[in-house]
Amino acid sequence: MHKFMFSRKNLGIPYGLFLAVFVMAPLLVLIYFAFTNGQGEFTLLNLTGFFSDPNTLGTLCYSFGIAAVTTAVCLLLAYPAAYILATSRLKAKSVIVLLFIMPMWINFSLRITALKEILTWAEGSLAYHPFLNTVLGMSYDFLPFMILPIYTTISKMDEALLEAARDLGAGGLQAFLKVTLPLSLPGIISGVSMVFLPAMTNYVVLDMLYNSTYIMGSLIGSYFASYNWHGGSMIALILLGIVCLFTLMTRGIEEENTRGGMLL
Amino acid sequence: MIRKAWKSMIIILVLCFLYLPILVLAVYSFTDAANIGTVRGFSLHNYVTLFTTPELVQMIAGTVVLAFVSAFFATILGTLGAIGAFYSKKGMASVINTMNQVPVVNADVVTGFSICILLVVVFGISKDSFIPLVAGHVTLCAPFVFLSVVPKLKQMDSSIYEAALDLGATPFTALIKIVIPQIFPGIVSGFALAVTLSLDDYFVATYTKPATFDTISTYVVNATKGAQTTIKTALWALSTVIFLLVVLFALFMNIRAGKNGQERNGI
């Protein structure tokens, strides 16, 4: 008899432990730090401080503003492009899809550098339009993440449904609004969730484009820089709460995650 | 006809938005201009600077080594995790699936910050040991390896594994000879994905890296805050080199997909 029976399900143990240590434990520590002060005593000050300070509340609103506008811009650009591509019979289709994915593989800081040089040349100084530049930068960075899931859902759609709609007397627009749009909703939601949250937290785009206004991510950055673990943990926890809310709201209707442009 | 022109226009417009900045920068990387818009002569000095400045070469090499080391560990852990979860009872599998989803949906700032708090602040592990950095990147990448292996397991023909057992193979041999080859494409794309995620990461690295070590992302972000012109324009060359490598990789993928006969939609 073997002392230890090899079993396929035991292969999951190392990864399960890994996730427990590097994913779950950090989150528990985050909760602990968020509700304690420097002396290790329980406190709600970090929480009440955040929601009573006009500065941090302003940051929350500005983040939501940036994220909402960025998401809208991405959706307006991505939907038509994804729709046209998914419904076309072009031979070069797979090449164009690849062109939409490729930017995900280029380092984002270098891409933002490129955009920054162009904007500096076009606007003279980046200081004139910080909000516009940030939205442009974020959209430029996140657009592929919106195109890909929408493209995938529309490609998977059963064309017979559209034909049926036409046979039953629906016009082109009506068929789009009543068949295509509702069926592509999972892709839209997946895209929105992959753009909205990064747009609330990716403060590097703001920094690189000389927008000195804070978003939620910048708060973590500044607490980190000043070794204020407790304040930073509270912000991280609030962001985590937003993620959870988002996940619960979109549960079950999302397209699978396509970050990084999974191939094959 | 007009409809068709409209459609092409929209696609071209979106492609221009995505590629124009990189392409313009690529053109200027071959000149001695310090800013976009100034007309100057052809020069390769940006490329010379890029490949001869020790600071830049070390930074690039460090980023690449980090990406491959993290992707290596992430691929082993993620693949084993996917196989284990696939054959586990429902409860166990859903626990692993849920935990796996956390770094995927979470903001990278939160992932990086929380790992820094646990490893550096609570356990006092020095950032100079590179342990927090590698652990952070493996945490960032492994869930995506897991996600690219799972669909391959679902597609797998389970009767072959059982046939192997019936023919006298041990479960371990059957795993190596039957399961792994069938899910191999998923493992490879998971590894590739892990490499790109690690190369692209800024947030996890900032919160966990040694002070003297820089990845491309952290270096570029610091360099934009008032570095000398030579470094700034050398980074244009770096952006061009990476762009060309990505184009080559995409070509390779496309040719391989063509060889496989059927059209893949790239996902």
Image (tube, coloured by chain):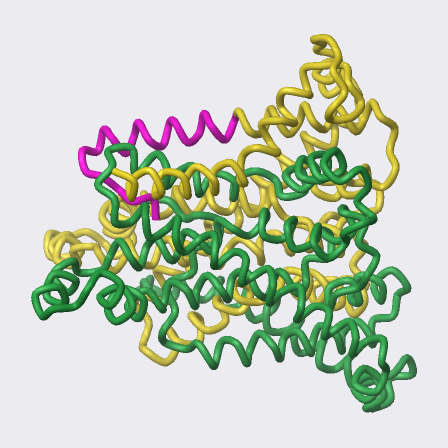
Chain colours: A green, B yellow
The answer to whether any part of residue B131 appears in the image is no
x and y, in percent, of residue A171 in the image:
19, 64
What residue is shown at x 71% (from left), y 72% (from top)?
A: A236
Relative side of A137 to A104, left or right: right
Please indicate whether residue A169 sits to the left or right of residue A146 in the image.
left
Describe residue A247's horizontal placement relative to residue A207 as left or right: left
Front-most of residues B177 and A241? A241
Q: How far from the left and from the top, in percent, is residue A180? A: 27, 64
Residue at left offset 7%, top offset 65%: A167
Residue at (51% x, 47% y) in the render: B194
Magenta stretch contains residue B254? yes
In magenta stretch: residue A226: no
- In the rendered structure, which segment of residues is drawn in magenta? B245-267
- Viewport quadrant of the N terminus of chain A: bottom left
Camera-side residue of A127 and A228:
A127
Q: Please state which of residues A124 and A153 is positioned toward the viewer in this rendering.
A: A124
Say if B244 sits above or below A222 in the image: above
Q: Give residue B263's position: percent from left, percent from top.
A: 22, 39
State the residue at coordinates (32%, 78%). B90
Which of A96/B57 is in front?
Answer: A96
In which quarter of the view is residue A135 placed? bottom right
Q: What percent of the width, then of the height, locates residue A84?
A: 32, 48
Give the prevailing secondary structure in the magenta stretch: helix
